[in-house]
Amino acid sequence: GEGQRERETQNVKQAPGSEQSAQSPTWGSNSHTPPRRPLGFLFLKNLVFGAPRWLSRLSNQHLISLQVMISWFMSLIPMSGSVLTAWNLLGILILLLSLSAPPLPAQSWWHKGALYRIGDLLAFQGHEEGDLAGLKRHLDYLSTLKVKGFVLGPIHKNQKDDLAGTNLEQINPVLGSKEDFDNLLQSAKKKSIRVILDLTPNYEGQNSWFLPTQIDTVAAKMKDALSFWLQAGVDGFQVRDVENLTDASLLLAEWQNITKSFSEDRLLIAGTESSDLQQILSLLGSTKDLLLTSSYLSDSISTGKHIEFLVTQYLNATDSRWCSWSLSQAGLLTSFVPAHLLRLYHLLLFTLPGTPVFSYGDEIGLEAAALPGQPVKAPIMPWDESSFPNTSEPGSNNMTVKGQNEDPGSLLSLFRRLSDQRGKERSLLHGDFHVLSSGPDLFAYVRQWDQNERFLVVLNFGDVGQPARLPATASLPTKVNLLLSTHLGREEGASLELGHLNVEPHEGLLLRFPYVA
């Protein structure tokens, strides 16, 4: 136990300029009343010792601007010597912070939160008739999930296995019109939700990309369609089953170039059923900013050490590339993860360095064909008990969006909390990633960025509770605060001693601790 606790933190992925925090200093136990000081000294003291909590949240540009504003303010208002000295020292402090702090990484919208896949428009709306106009009414729900964008469709006209009868620029009339789509785009834009269009050509047929001999025609249609929909205002594209696409790496690079040439703020997502790392790397090729969803994490072996191995291997292999995290290119989490580990995987996907990608229903634990009358391919989203078709028996309320929305301990509530943290904390947005040595069934890591609050994630994939056995290094404090647990019953906000931290079976902990200079 003690020998294992002394093992050092493994640095897996670290941003340039980032440093690990020092261990909290030990202050003397004797208390005393400080002598009275001039107002300027007390003001400076409070600002300086509070600096890591507020100044560190400003960018270099903002820090320099603040320093200039202070200098201007000082030139306008007469001040006593002590106050003037305090302001001068504060200005110097801010300037030094701006010079020493690493610059914030340039981030696009898909770096800042989760993406949400709506592969079947009819099933998502929860009734037999659904269209683009109806989807617009669910945008408020997507806003509550705090997702940054949703992947829609495919919704284009596709005659099964008929290339001539497939039009990538025409919407299936059953789903609505181009005007309906334009209205959806505008409504989503007002809510700061991006729209990504799935353009997988032959989604109704046997081969998503038709026959290999037809690849030239398919590529030409894709090129025209990309330009058409970019002009229409979409924020990105998804194509699936790219392992079956002839010359996939070359075509993906070409389509990525078209997308980025229109705007750097546009995204291309590729999906594959493959879980083989070498094939995934081959598909990624040399393309910039291509997100690739795969079955890489869907391994049936769900032990802490195995998940740790998969994650670290992937991060090391992709090097500085921005990653996406999911368990498949289109399926539900419940198709790959047992129910008792579902909350654990939500915590994992939201706190790894990269973009988490979910399918509709993942936030409530929707299962394929788990309810009476559910189609296997695209299970109906149960908004409330009236959403269950072809059965007179009402479904369990805790399986519906409405039921979970009213339950603070539900999976939906956990999803929303994690999504909120992922989108606002710099350490989770773009922080460094450090794996920690831990117990055999545990996966533990730290996310940290400069002087911002750090996050410690501890995941127990085992069937028994066990001590965390985290390393006693200068990078970790002796105590942390509990932000949330995947299990109910723990007191949130409680201070926990890392040396005596026990993790329940199948429990995940999101812990936080401050930067200490």
Image: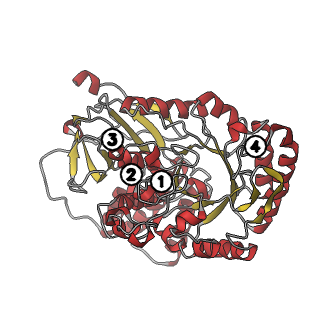
Give the residue number, with chain letter if any, for mark 4.
252
Residue type at mark 1 is: Arg
Q: CA distance from mark 4 to mark 2?
A: 38 Å
Q: In the visual, does 508 lie left or right of 261?
A: left
On screen, residue 392 above or below 301: below
- Residue 320 visible in rendering: yes
User: Does label 3 or label 1 sit earlier along the sequence?
Assistant: 1
At horizontal 21% and vertical 39% (from top left) the residue drawn is: 502
Q: Quadrant of residue 59?
A: bottom right
At horizontal 71% and vertical 46% (from top left) the residue drawn is: 208
- Determine whether the residue tagged by mark 2 lies in a helix, strand or loop: loop
Give the residue number, with chain letter if any, for mark 3.
458
Residue type at mark 2 is: Glu
Within 10 Å of disc 3 (Cα), the crowding (few <14, some 14-19, many 20+) is many
Give the residue number, with chain letter if any, for mark 1.
426
- Determine whether the residue tagged by mark 1 lies in a helix, strand or loop: helix
Q: CA distance from mark 3 to mark 1?
A: 19 Å
